[in-house]
Amino acid sequence: MVVKSIDIYYIARPFSLNQNFLICTKSLKDNMPPTLSIAIPTYNRAELLSYCIERIMKEFQGKSIDFEIVVSDNVSTDHTAIIVAEKIANGYPVKYYRKNENSGAFPNYYNVYRRCTGDYIIWLADDDSIDSDQVLKYVDLLNQDETLVGIYTDWMAYDDNSESELHRYWPQIPAMEFSPDQKHLMVDHIIQNQLLVEQGIFRRKEFIKAYVPYQYGFPYYYWLYNLSGQGKLRFDPEPFYKENRVLKPQFDRGSHWSNKDLAFQLIGDQMRIAIESLFFQLLSDYPWDHYDSKNRLLLVNYIDGWLHRRTTLEIARAIARSNWILAVELRRRQIMKDGNSNLDKSYSEFIEITLPASIQAIHEIHKSIDDKKKLVFYGFHSTQIHDLFHKIFPDAEVVSLNELTLFDHPEEILLISKSSKSDFNQHGIPSGQIIDFTSLIECYRLSKIDPGWLHPL
């Protein structure tokens, strides 16, 4: 969209960082609403927001679609307002709203969505990006079918630094559509495929009706069901959204909110409440005649099974992120439900989860005390643990006893001892600088591991 000239205007008072105002663009040609609204909630990420807007403009350059970029600022204390004013001055189709007070993330979402004016709406985090070509394909689908009120899509975890995809969140499933009288089939599709329903493109008016406040759980499922009563929904595995888990080196999120690890929430009470609410809404639309104590128990067990199956996926993701301690915690939940593994699987889990978790624990303790201290592995029968640690954490300084006279400078080392029986206090090494490796193995064990397994190490 080319804006030949713009009007900049404010609400009530002139531009001020601590006053509520609106900056927007108007085409002199007409005041018709745009086809697409890109809604961006933001807080204290001026440089990331600037880069995000520039990428949107580049993505849609030369594309035949009218669009607006709507920004809701949760009372940023940085130069966000100045950055946006510069974009406006450059003729970018930006609307900017600054809230009177920081009321949290979701209220900022509600604000930005209700400020949009386009026929269709997508939301975009200020540290993420989109594929405009795929967005336009979905716009075409919505244009062709007026009964279609929204398209939920997969999205990709993305390394923006190397510009490479990390993974996606949905299984490889065909696209499916469900009408309002097929809600039971829609819910079954979501549950059977364990779909995370966060991203999509929607008809704005219908979406705003559905997008109402909730206090807990993953509200995306509530909003989905609210939306499903207004028209047909499509579930399409082709993503347009890039969740930039790794940023380019010049950027810093400055907030824990975005891209945080949601593993426990996705298998815990927040997800349970969301799925329970999804079924409750479904039951409200169908006769309750058969919702007796027996079927209630079956439904609860069904939800338990859904969360349980999802735990397997979160364990694999934790291992892929080199977070074996988290994998231990998640695996224990499964063992409590299913019982312990056979001997072969127990040994495999010891090698793949317990042992790396112990190595990770050494690294965490090393960082928390002083990562300048040299690591010394003492009392092991081989260098296997030493070598494994160095492979996983190559930047840490690991020395052998041949390179360091062990007790000459005790303040310089962090000692990893194979046995807790040795007394190093007489050599001037305080107990806080000694890590009992056998105790770590016990802390992270997933079964009754024979300590003899450690002897060859």
Image (tube, grey):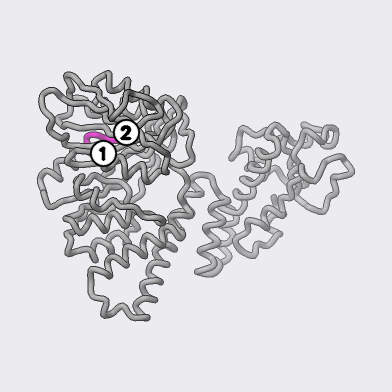
Q: Residue at x 15, y 45 (%)?
A: 142
Q: Residue at x 23, y 32 (%)?
A: 68
Q: Mark 1 falls on what kind of element? A: helix
Q: Residue at x 34, y 43 (%)?
A: 109
Q: Is residue 125 visible?
A: yes
Query: Of the numbered discs in the image, which one, if any, rests on residue 97?
Result: 2
Q: Quadrant of residue 53?
A: top left
Assess disc 1: are there few (<14), some (14-19) or many (≥20) residues with their C-alpha within 10 Å of its C-alpha: some
Dots 1, 2 in contact, CB < 8 A: yes
The percent position of residue 26, horizontal first and vertical second, equals 18, 26
Answer above or below: position of 276 versus 111. Answer: below
Q: Is residue 68 left or right of residue 329?
A: left
Q: Residue at x 40, y 40 (%)?
A: 166
Q: Which residue type carries mark 2?
A: Tyr
CA gap, disc 1 to disc 2? 8 Å
Which is more N-terminal, label 2 or label 1? 2
Instruction: Pick whichever, 89 or 315, lies toward us.
Output: 89
Q: Residue furthest front?
A: 12
- On whether residue 324 falls in the magenta region, the answer is no
Residue highlighted by disc 1? 115
- On whether residue 132 falls in the magenta region, the answer is yes
The percent position of residue 255, horizontal first and vertical second, equals 48, 37
Q: Quadrant of residue 429?
A: top right
What's the magenta region?
128-135
| Quarter of the figure with the N terminus | top left
Q: Which residue type carries mark 1?
A: Arg
Q: Is residue 381 visible?
A: no
Q: Is residue 252 left or right of residue 40?
A: right
Answer above or below: position of 291 versus 60. Answer: below
